[in-house]
Image (cartoon, grey):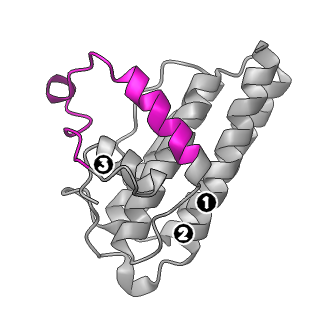
Amino acid sequence: MSDEAAEQEAIDGIKFAHGEFRRVLGNVTPDQWTAPTPSDEWDVRALMNHVIQGNRWVERNVIAEGADFPTDDFVGDGDPIEVFDASMDDLWAAIEAATAEQRLNDWYVGTRTSEFMIHGWDLAKATGQDTNLAPELNESLLAAFRVGFEGYDRAKDGSYKDEVPVPATAPAADRFAGFLGNHV
């Protein structure tokens, strides 16, 4: 695959994943922002702040690599959906500029694709929505993560919990979530 084709595939992936995530986000009701998520440390509002932090991190690294992951409370007292949408507007602008200048690192774009899928699952689970998101994309992500995690020490890194067994007949999004340590 050419660099240009890989770049376009990454952009198509993030656009699709963003659409799926945004659809779930649009169904969150005001009383659900304090609901617990499958992640022990976050409620729905904190999960959204983490997703926005990720958007800002990728935006900054698409502009100039080397940015640290932000720890800011981007949501604060604001509307999480409006803050998310603003972060996406800035991320899209950074991706478009980097693409036009032929300097887009599609690895960063790919991280948002997988993050939108796993955190879309978290958000759907926390708010009682259908977790069967983007079956083909989640199947592809699960396969890629299985290969990428070969020899990876989850306990040492701490970013991911141990895999939780999920039936092979479960939807791909549930199996991907279980692979990343979420109880389905």
Looking at the image, is 156 positioned above or below residue 184? above
User: Whole-percent x and y of residue 92?
Assistant: 71, 43
Who is closer to the viewer here, 16 or 32?
Answer: 16
Taking the spot 81% from the left edge, 19% from the top edge, the residue there is 4
Residue 165 as seen in the image, left or right of residue 75: left
Marks 1 and 3, the one that precedes in the sequence: 1
Q: Which mark is residue 20?
A: 1
Kind of residue at disc 2: Val
Looking at the image, is 163 positioned above or below residue 23? above
The residue where tag 3 is placed is 178
User: Whole-percent x and y of residue 104?
Assistant: 70, 22
Q: Residue 152 in magenta?
A: yes
Farthest residue, direction right:
100
User: What is the C-alpha distance between the residues marked 1 and 2?
Assistant: 7 Å
Kind of residue at disc 3: Gly
- Residue interval drawn in magenta: 137-165
Q: Residues within 10 Å of mark 2 (few under 14, many from 20)?
A: some
Q: Which mark is residue 72?
A: none
Marks 2 and 3, the one that precedes in the sequence: 2
Quadrant housing residue 157: top left
User: Whole-percent x and y of residue 182?
Assistant: 27, 52
Q: Are marks 1 and 2 in contact (CB under 8 Å)?
A: yes
User: What is the C-alpha distance between the residues marked 1 and 3?
Assistant: 19 Å
Taking the spot 29% from the left edge, 60% from the top edge, the residue there is 184
Kind of residue at disc 1: Glu
The residue where tag 2 is placed is 24
User: Whole-percent x and y of residue 153?
Assistant: 20, 21
Quadrant housing residue 84: bottom right
Taking the spot 43% from the left edge, 84% from the top edge, the residue there is 30
